[in-house]
Image (cartoon, rainbow, N blue to C red):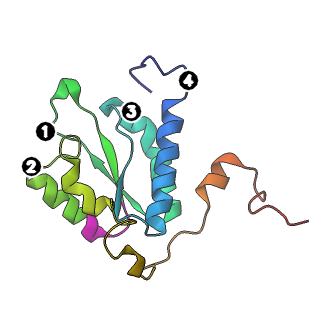
Amino acid sequence: MSKKNQHSHCFNRKSFILGMITAFCECLANECKKIAFSPPFYPEDYEKLLPEAKKIAKEQGVFLWYEKNPDIPEKARLNWFVLYKFPEVLDEYKRLREEGHNPAWDLKAFYKLLSYGTAWGINADRVIPKTREKRGSLDTVSRLLLKPGDWPPRKT
């Protein structure tokens, strides 16, 4: 991964980004969020992240869309993956972008799509949980961290 910073000796950036993608894909797969963003990354990191990010998304039954951010000046440009389960949610994200909103500068415009504020929203206690569609079956976390057959752990 490119552009080391003062904290790069503490962790592996690629692993960190992929770990966050895994966590957000789980939230999307279980419909806790409508949309999520990967951590921002430099444009030159894209090719290094893409194969595993695609695999994680596929395992979780969600999709990736690469946000190239042409509205961010090239010398300062950062990109991210937009993670989503249903295409109409990506359409809404793109509509907001076409209106000139960029999450880097105007995150509030994306709050509803990101499902921010819903856990403590007005009448949140009246919401009856419902999953629209179950997808994916492979546990990405166990694939990445454990030996085959070690998840779930045996009871005996």
2 or 3: tag closer to the N-terminus? 3
| Left or right placement of residue 3 versus residue 137 in this view | left
3 or 1: tag closer to the N-terminus? 3
Is there CB contact under 8 Å for labels 1 and 2? Answer: yes
Q: Position of residue 41 (x, y in %)?
A: 35, 35
Callout 3: SS: helix
4 or 1: tag closer to the N-terminus? 4
Callout 4: SS: loop
**Magenta span:** 84-89
Q: CA distance from mark 1 to mark 2?
A: 9 Å
Using the image, determine if residue 62 lies above or below residue 43.
Answer: below
Is there CB contact under 8 Å for labels 4 and 1? Answer: no
Q: CA distance from mark 3 to mark 1?
A: 19 Å
Query: Residue flagged by tag 2: what amino acid is it?
Result: Gly
Q: Position of residue 36 (x, y in %)?
A: 36, 55
Q: Which residue is mark 1?
A: 71
The one nearer the camera, 103 or 82, is 103
Residue drawn where x is 30% and y is 33% of the image? 43
Q: Nearer the viewer, mark 4 or mark 3?
A: 4
**Residue 10 numbered tag:** 4
Is there CB contact under 8 Å for labels 3 and 1? Answer: no
- Mark 4, other Cα within 10 Å: few <14 / some 14–19 / many ≥20: few
Using the image, determine if residue 48 lies above or below residue 2.
Answer: below
2 or 4: tag closer to the N-terminus? 4
Is residue 82 on the magenta stretch? no
Q: Which residue is mark 3?
A: 45
Q: CA distance from mark 2 to mark 4?
A: 36 Å
